[in-house]
Amino acid sequence: MEHLVRIVNDTDRQVLAWLRAQVGDARVERAARQLGHTRKPFPSAVCRYLGMNAPATLRHASRPRVARDFSVGDRYLSLIREHLAAHTAGR
């Protein structure tokens, strides 16, 4: 089935598997062929064509959270606060 639908990542693969389980291979194949006149459609386009919505758990696959460093921003905020406090105290 992946030869008819554009699979870019694992989420696309999971959505296609879910869609095949919901409506069957024949309907997915017909929809992909209808949509794929110039190029292969994405699984989301096939879902829309069939009037289906993939579950949110599939559409937004969990990504590992990357620890972000906010130390630079925090330092600038503290400098701004100091500047504002000095400006307010000088009045």
Image (tube, rainbow, N blue to C red):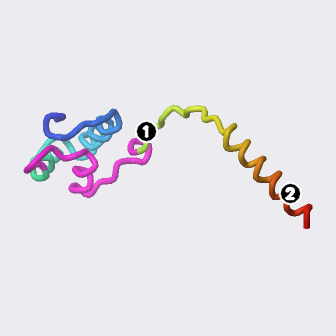
Side of 79 where 88 appears, left or right: right
Residue 23, numbered label = none
Query: Looking at the picture, which amino acid does disc 2 mark?
Result: Ala
Secondary element under disc 2, as helix, strand or loop, is: helix
Residue found at the very far front of the displayed protein:
90
Vertical order, 3 against 85 (above or below)? above
- List x then y, in percent, for residue 82: 83, 51
Q: For the magenta stretch, what is the residue range?
A: 36-59
- List x then y, in percent, for residue 55: 39, 47
Query: Looking at the picture, which amino acid does disc 1 mark?
Result: Ala
Spatial distance from mark 2 to mark 1, Cα to Cα? 45 Å
Q: Residues within 10 Å of mark 1 (few under 14, many from 20)?
A: few
- List x then y, in percent, for residue 2: 18, 34
Query: Which residue does the numbered mark 1 point to in the structure image?
Result: 61
Vertical order, 4 against 45 (above or below)? above
Residue found at the very far bottom of the displayed protein:
91
Q: How many marks?
A: 2
Secondary element under disc 1, as helix, strand or loop, is: loop
Is 50 covered by the magenta stretch? yes
Query: Which residue does the numbered mark 2 point to in the structure image?
Result: 85
Side of 80 where 91 appears, left or right: right
Q: Quadrant of the C terminus?
A: bottom right
Q: Nearer the viewer, residue 71 or 10?
A: 71
Q: Nearer the viewer, residue 6 or 31?
A: 6
Residue drawn at point x = 14 percent, y = 47 percent = 32
Residue 67 falls in image quadrant: top right
Is 57 covered by the magenta stretch? yes
Residue drawn at point x = 24 percent, y = 37 percent = 7
Residue drawn at point x = 69 percent, y = 37 percent = 71
Residue drawn at point x = 73 percent, y = 49 percent = 77
Q: Earlier in the sequence, mark 2 or mark 1?
A: 1
Side of 39 where 18 appears, left or right: right
